[in-house]
Amino acid sequence: MGYGPPAAPADSRSQEQGKTKGNRRISCVPPQYWYVSLTLNVTSRIRNDSMSAIGETRVLPEELASARAQRSMAVPMGLEIYSLRGEAEKDLPATLALIRKLGFTEVEGGDFYGHSAAEFRKILDSNGLNLTSMMAAYDRLSRDINAVAGDAHTLGADYVVCSTVPHKKKLTAEDCDRAIESLNRFGQNLAKAGLRCCYHIHGIEFGKSADGTLFDTLAKGTNPNFANFEMDIFWIVFAYQDPVKLLHQYPGRFPLMHIKDIRKGTVLGGSPGDVLEEASVPLGTGLVNIPAALRAARETGVRHYYIEDEAVDAAQQLSESLRYLESVRL
């Protein structure tokens, strides 16, 4: 069953990831400028919070440069905290302080790194960070959606993102049918709690179906009043799809976006689980046409943008990505 266009959104303000050492694989388990929810305030004081677990107590020159860079970005960015998962596992307060020093005021996340939701919120608040989107595992959404909603409210999130749906190596039409039922149900229950539901696209959704692709089936079957999508432009390109075309084909269905770039020479297609984390590179250095994707996103209703860098050395790459975004003109 298909649905009409989504209702106008109200004003708004991970699954646990697999980890191995060495060359780790990326885990896919877990109009105008949209300044309303994407503001990066770089005029406030940059604090010298202790960074003992990360190794520096001073504000580094590259941190200052990247913070200044965000003042002129056409589409200011939030950050997916998973980008700094290694640092967060060691010292969450220091990591969130680093994120703020880089100029971010908005984040997305799902792992609490050993803290309660209330403790996590206090650390966010102490660093002037707003968590606008919370990732959640499908199993947890199925098992205890009220607890998920409670955590989202505690953190101040507007969106809850289902990080994946059950499937084997490839998503099937039967998997899609079950996902449609689940996502509509999740969305209806979350809407009762004043939250919005999205599903994170990982590139497995573009096998053929009677509707065109399995994603077309998902988009047709989910009610946009209750369930929409988070686009990850890395995985869209990995699946031989065009983010610009998809955004224009489904305007309003992608309120959230992960901004990522994919290393030149990466073999596209196949299983996302086989992609090494090193395939995630600084924005503007890889295969993705970042300006075109951002332009289309702005034109089609994307409301929240999050840089995500899954490389082991993401902390070093983020400053380069921010400086690149300073040069982008839409």
Image (cartoon, helix red, strand yellow):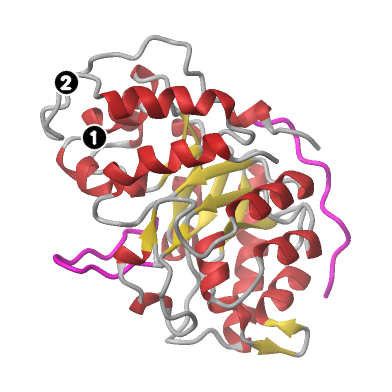
State the separation of the CA atoms marked 2 and 1: 11 Å
Residue at (30%, 64%) from the top-left corner? 278
Q: Which residue is mark 2?
A: 50
Q: Is residue 146 above or below residue 172?
A: above
Which residues fall within the magenta stretch? 1-27
Image position, residue 191 (x, y; %): 67, 46
Closer to the camera in the image, 195 or 65: 65
Q: Is residue 185 above or below residue 120?
A: below
Disc assigned to residue 37 = none
**Quarter in which the C terminus is drawn:** top right
Image position, residue 184 (x, y; %): 67, 63
Image position, residue 326 (x, y; %): 53, 34
**273 relative position to 75: left or right:** left
> From where the camera sits, is residue 151 visible?
no
Q: Which residue is mark 1?
A: 92
Q: Amino acid at mark 1?
A: Leu
Crowd rating for badge 2 (residues with CA inside 10 Å; few <14, some 14–19, many 20+): some
**Quarter in which the N terminus is drawn:** bottom right
Residue 33 highlighted magenta (yes or no): no
Q: Is residue 100 above or below residue 279?
A: above
**125 relative position to 153: left or right:** left
Residue at (28%, 42%) from the top-left corner? 315
Q: Earlier in the sequence, mark 2 or mark 1?
A: 2
Which quadrant holds residue 311?
A: bottom left
Q: Nearer the viewer, mark 2 or mark 1?
A: 2
Q: Amino acid at mark 2?
A: Ser
Q: Callout 2: helix, strand or loop?
A: loop
Residue at (52%, 52%) from the top-left corner? 258
